[in-house]
Amino acid sequence: MSNWMRTILIGFIAGAVGVLIFHQFGFWLATELGWARSRIYNMQPVPPWGVPTIVSAAFWGGLWGILAAFVVPRLPGALGGVLGWVLFAAIIVTLVNWFVVLPIKGAPMGGGFRMPGVVVVPIVYGFWGLGMWLIARGTRTALSWR
C-alpha cells in the first residue's frame, strides 16, 4: 500500500474514532459540568440522507482526520506532533465550523458567539485533536507503518 493511502486510512480512522471517543467524551464532560447542553451519541437523522447525527459527525471527523494527517506532520518543529494535532482541531476545525458549517445550516456564525460555547467548543475540539494524534500514532505503530 502506498504511503498516501496509508495516510488517508490512518487519518480517517483517527478522525472518526476520535469523534466517537474523545469528541463525545469532551461534550459529555462539558454537559456534566454545566458548561454545555450537548446530546452525545445523538441518533437524530441528519438531512439529506437521514443518517444518525453521530454517524455524520464520525464521517466528517474522518475527513478532518485525513486533512490533519497530511498537513500536521509537515509543520515545523513542535507543531508537527501532538501540539499541531491539538491546535489544528481547536483552531482550524472550530473556525470552519463557526464561519462555514453553521451558516450553511442556517444557524448564526459561531452559534451566536454565546458564552461558554466560545470557550468550550475549541477546548473540546482540541481534546479531539489529542485523541486523533493518539489514535493515528497507535494505528501506525500497530500496523508497523511509518
Image (cartoon, rainbow, N blue to C red):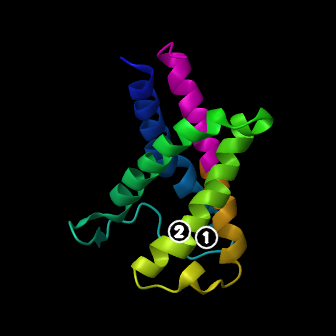
Residue 86 visible (yes or no): yes
Residue 90: say if magenta. no
Determine whether, in the image, residue 119 is placed left or right of residue 146: right
Check contact, mark 1 vs mark 2: CB within 8 A: no
Q: Nearer the viewer, residue 47 or 66?
A: 66
Extreme-left residue of the structure: 49
The prevailing secondary structure element of the residues shown in magenta is helix
Where are the magenta residues, as a range? 129-146
* Residue under pointer 1: 31
Of tags 1 and 2, the one toward the viewer is 2
Q: Nearer the viewer, residue 131 or 109?
A: 109
Look at the image and tell me in which quarter the N terminus lies: top left
Residue at (46% x, 41% y) in the render: 66
Determine whether, in the image, residue 84 is placed left or right of residue 77: left
Determine whether, in the image, residue 129 is placed left or right of residue 9: right
Q: Nearer the viewer, residue 101 or 41?
A: 101
Extreme-right residue of the structure: 77
The answer to whether residue 92 is above or below residue 140 is below
Mark number, residue 105: none
Q: Secondary structure at mark 2?
A: helix
Expressed as whole percent of the image width and height from the top left, the position of residue 144 reads: 51, 12
